[in-house]
Amino acid sequence: MSGYFVGFFLGIWIAAPLIRRVGHIRAFAFCAALAASTALLHVVIVDQWVWLGLRVLYGIALVTLYTVIESWLNDQAEASQRGRVFGGYMIASYLGLVLGQMVLVVHPTLGIELLMLVAMCFSLCLVPVAATRKIHPAALHPAPLEPRFFIRRVPQSLTTVLVSGLLIGAFYGLAPLYATRLGLATQQVGVFMGSCILAALLVQWPLGWISDRRDRAWLIRACALLLSVAALPLALLGEVPLAVLLPLGFVVSLLQFSLYPLAVAFSNDHVEAERRGSLSAMLLVTFGIGACIGPLLAGVLMKYLGANMLYAFVSVCALILVWRVRPEAVTNLHQVDDAPLQHIPMPDSTASSPLTAALDPRVDEQVVEAQMQNGDGGSSAASTPNG
């Protein structure tokens, strides 16, 4: 399950050169065909190491598809519309994830038909792209990462994003296995996963309202503390009936999917406008590293100590975040003049690319595009920890 996130991580560097070389439409067609083929190859070759390689290829294909979509959306959206476009993109991403889980309710047999459905979806997504009369936009270049600068400037935000990657990577990779080990039928696993992902969508707007009115470092710490408590019943109970699992899983998801958008908002409050493109890329890479490691660590715990260790892992990670995020350590020395910036509902980074920053209304589009094309990281002056 970590293979997908490894591919997603690698695709961050592969997507932009591929698009520059062959263009948006050809890159989209190439990766859609690759994703469809990898799905079907799971039937042809049943071997865990081959499947690992297929999952890596699948991750590379997906992040390239997201990059093409986001480039196109950014090219078509006026500056005044970017907030609505970004919100619509996030809703479409989450609804797609929820509907994917609901397929298991309608078709609970885990046979070749589901893999054929995946391949068919990738084939069908080529239809509107191949039929368009529009000229594809100019390819955007990924922004420079500047890891040392951001580690000094926004260490608490990066820690939050890393832990969020650990949690969400483990959730997507192992929550279906956890539900299966509890004895749930395939339909029930689909309902459980769908309700958890729906929680991630529903929490975004109330979270934004609160985030714009309260100290964000305090909110991150409070969410982490509540998450560690909410996950404890699932961590301690070996058997959980569905009537208890659904509300508990929903609450845990509300909290764990709050961490990433809060960290993004918190970090943007302490980074100058010309560096926000680089910041977005750095946050995505940090999330990707965590998402690669999360399923491995939680998977080992589940293998030797039981399925409920998935939520013990969640609780421990949340406690680490409570320990590491300290509002009193925020100096506000580099806080931007108009902080707190507006909180923007965001995808959880499993459904976005480094170009997400171009759609974010908090980011100056012209500044970011120039920075991406020039590879200019800006001043490397020493910075004081803020976020």
Image: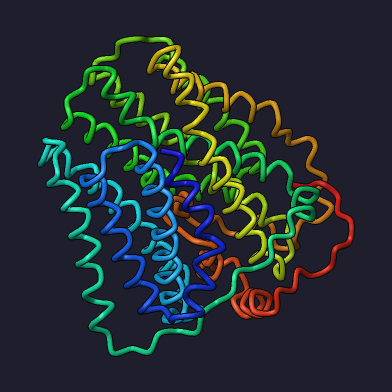
Could you say where residue 183 lies in the image, as x and y percent from the top left? 22, 18
Report which quarter residue 141 is drawn in.
bottom right
**Residue in the image at 54% along x and 68% along y:** 361
Q: Is residue 31 left or right of residue 155?
A: left
Quarter of the image with the N terminus is: top left
Front residue (pair 386, 144):
144
Could you say where residue 263 lies in the image, as x and y percent from the top left? 61, 46
Report which quarter residue 358 is drawn in.
bottom right
**Residue in the image at 56% along x and 40% along y:** 290
**Residue in the image at 35% along x and 42% along y:** 51
Could you say where residue 352 lies in the image, as x and y percent from the top left? 46, 58
- On the question of residue 81 being in view, the answer is yes
Q: Is residue 142 left or right of residue 167?
A: right
The mark tally for this picture is 0
Front residue (pair 366, 293):
293
- On the question of residue 205 being in view, the answer is no
On screen, residue 129 above or below 239: below
Could you say where residue 92 lies in the image, as x and y percent from the top left? 32, 59
Front residue (pair 144, 273):
144
Front residue (pair 49, 195):
49
Q: Residue furthest right?
A: 382
Q: Is residue 196 left or right of residue 243?
A: right
**Residue in the image at 64% along x and 55% along y:** 282
- The image's colour scheme reads rainbow
